Image (cartoon, rainbow, N blue to C red):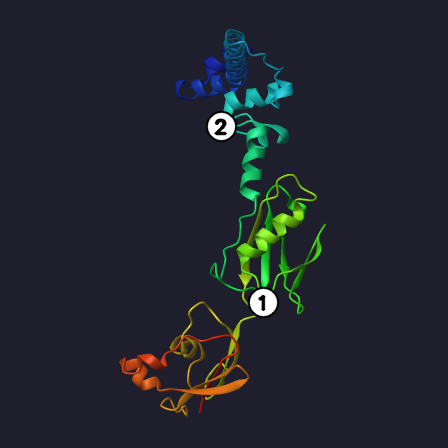
Amino acid sequence: MNAASWLDALPASDRWRARLLRDGPRIATWILVIALAVQAALILTDLAAASRGGAAAGVRHAPVHSRGVDLATITNAHLFGAPPALKQDDANAPQDGKTTSSVASDSKATTQPKEPMSVAGPDYLIGADDALHISVWKEPDLTNTLPVRPDGKISMPLLNDVQAAGLTPMQLADSLTEKLKKYLADPRVTVVVTQMNSQRIYILGEVLHSGAIPLLPNMTVLQALATAGFTQFANTKNIYVLRTQNGKQQKMPFNYRQAMKGDTVAQNINLKPGDTIVVP
């Protein structure tokens, strides 16, 4: 019995299923071939359009494989809708029209260190244990943050030991500028006080934080006590400040409660380096 007579012998309801089982693989193969042919035509059209556009703009296009996309990847992109994957080198290339030089300049601009802020006023006298940031324009080897030694000097390349204690930041900058003229054509020096460790006051007695604290510009007794805090046993009415002046020690009273009310403004004096506040 041949295939035609075999199909004719089947019931009409089962005849279409038998035809599908017989002819289905062949039909699927032709559908796949037609789909691949259409996709190949689309790929060739895209490549031709890209070549024409590049030639019109005066741009030379590299081969597809050198741009990190092969034909198999393009085929998969058209078949499954996935964008072509770039090679690692192309993925790391600058985007959005930025060139390598512009990216490098942007990175250099962002990594350039900023000048530190000064913690002292222009009339501040530099002392031992202070920290100074000395910047020499266009001379990174001479730009550094230096401590003031106990002898009041700092050490710099080319100049060795330079006296810093007893000078204001501007005076020290002028001194360094004059000394560097022997080695540089037009030195420009900036001096910034980053830590004031030489000028300190001391707080003792019934306080939460006793010891030495940095003396800020125009710091008063009330401001210093605010940083120290009181214990529950503090006698805030009989606080006093000890100050040594001209070889003699002075005792200056301070009533915290009246100062808070604004009654003893004269007692809220500006502190000087070496003053000691005692809270009994």
Residue that appears at 61% across and 17% down: 64
From the image, tell me which residue sits under label 1. 127
Amino acid type of the residue tagged 1 in the rendering: Gly
Count neighbours of disc 1 (C-alpha within 10 A) and say few if under 14, some if 14 to 19, many if 20 or more. Answer: many
- Please identify the quarter of the rendering in which residue 151 is found: bottom right
- State which quarter of the image contains the N terminus: top right
Q: Nearer the viewer, residue 99 or 245?
A: 245
Residue that appears at 59% across and 32% down: 92
Residue that appears at 62% across and 31% down: 88
Is residue 143 at all visible to an observer of this figure? no
Seen in the picture, residue 163 relative to 54 is either above or below; the reply is: below
Amino acid type of the residue tagged 2 in the rendering: Asp
Place of residue 46 in the rendered image (x, y in percent of width and height, measured from the top left): 51, 13
Count neighbours of disc 2 (C-alpha within 10 A) and say few if under 14, some if 14 to 19, many if 20 or more. Answer: few
Counting labels gives 2
Seen in the picture, residue 177 relative to 5 is either above or below; the reply is: below
- State which quarter of the image contains the C terminus: bottom left
Is residue 47 at all visible to an observer of this figure? yes
Q: Considering the numbered disc 1 on the image, is that residue within a helix, a strand or a loop?
A: loop
The circle on residue 96 is 2
Place of residue 6 in the rendered image (x, y in percent of width and height, measured from the top left): 51, 14
Q: Considering the numbered disc 2 on the image, is that residue within a helix, a strand or a loop?
A: loop
